Amino acid sequence: MTFSIVARCADTGMFGVAIASSSPAVAARCSYARAGVGAVASQNVTDPSLGPLGLDLLARGLGARDALAALRGQGTFMDYRQVLMVDAAGQTAIHSGPNALGVWAQAQALNVASGGNLLRDAAVAQAIVDGFLVSRGHLGDRLIAAMQAGLAAGGEAGPIHSAGMKLVDKVSWPVADLRCDWTEGCPIDAVATAWGVYKPQLDAYIQRALDPRAAPSYGVPGDD
């Protein structure tokens, strides 16, 4: 009931996760990333604890493959889980348990991994990876393009209702965390629209947190 991507920008070291599902609020339960460490998506029959645990393993210096091997040993009911990881070197690893739902698939390359379950077509994961690899620009733009490529390749077998995108870079909080928790329309389009609004302001929000004295004005009514 989910398809996703974890990725690293080779130019900046920024990490990101993008995800979509027929379930509500998928990004709240399945997307995890930590600046300088990596990104993890935990999906299928989701155990949200696997995300932070995976990031802790990466933070200890384990590469994606070793971290995922350790996670398999520490997690419960891993036959039901699907987990994607990318580490600080851009190496990737994927676990898809044998009880993954419906048509499931996974694909990976340097700096990017994708996986999904209850898909309309097993080619969806590779389409997401290919969409990322041929894209250019900001990591957020590339994640959106990759998810749209997965949707064009068939996406989920049924309608998707929620989606999200999380980006981390240099600071301890997500520099972007955009979600559509439920819609009867296309949640990936909704996140893309939100990103189009948020992207030009991303750096200003970081500056306001680090040093509001040097930050631009808010540009809203009442900001005199």
Image (cartoon, rainbow, N blue to C red):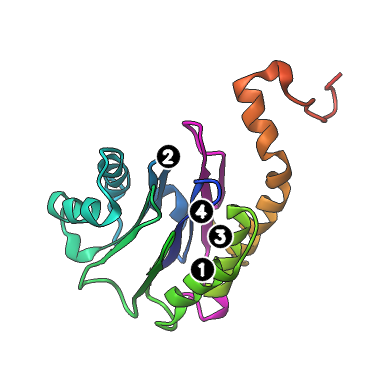
**How far is disc 2 from disc 4 in space, using C-alphas?**
12 Å
Helix, strand or loop under label 4: loop
Q: Is residue 163 visible?
A: yes
- In the visual, does 12 lie left or right of 223? left
The amino acid type found where label 3 is placed reads Leu
Quick one: label 2 or label 4, which is nearer the N terminus? 4
Helix, strand or loop under label 1: loop
The amino acid type found where label 1 is placed reads Ile
Label 1 Cα crowd, 10 Å radius (few <14 / some 14-19 / many 20+): many
As drawn, 192 above or below 36: below
Where is residue 172 drawn, in percent x and y? 46, 31
Asked if the residue at tag 3 contacts the one at tag 2, i.e. Cβ–Cβ closer than 8 Å, the answer is: no
The amino acid type found where label 4 is placed reads Ala
Disc assigned to residue 38 = none
Q: Quadrant of the C terminus?
A: top right
Q: Residue at (73%, 44%) from the top-left corner?
A: 200
Q: Name the residue carrying label 2.
A: 36
Asked if the residue at tag 3 contacts the one at tag 4, i.e. Cβ–Cβ closer than 8 Å, the answer is: no
Q: Name the residue carrying label 4.
A: 10
Residue furthest top in the image: 213
Magenta range:
151-180
Disc assigned to residue 160 = 1
Find out whether residue 164 is within the magenta segment: yes
**How far is disc 3 from disc 1 in space, using C-alphas?**
17 Å
**How far is disc 2 from disc 1 in space, using C-alphas?**
31 Å
Closest to the camera, between mark 2 and mark 3, is 2
Query: Which residue is at the front of the view, 57 or 30?
Result: 57
**How far is disc 2 from disc 3 in space, using C-alphas?**
18 Å
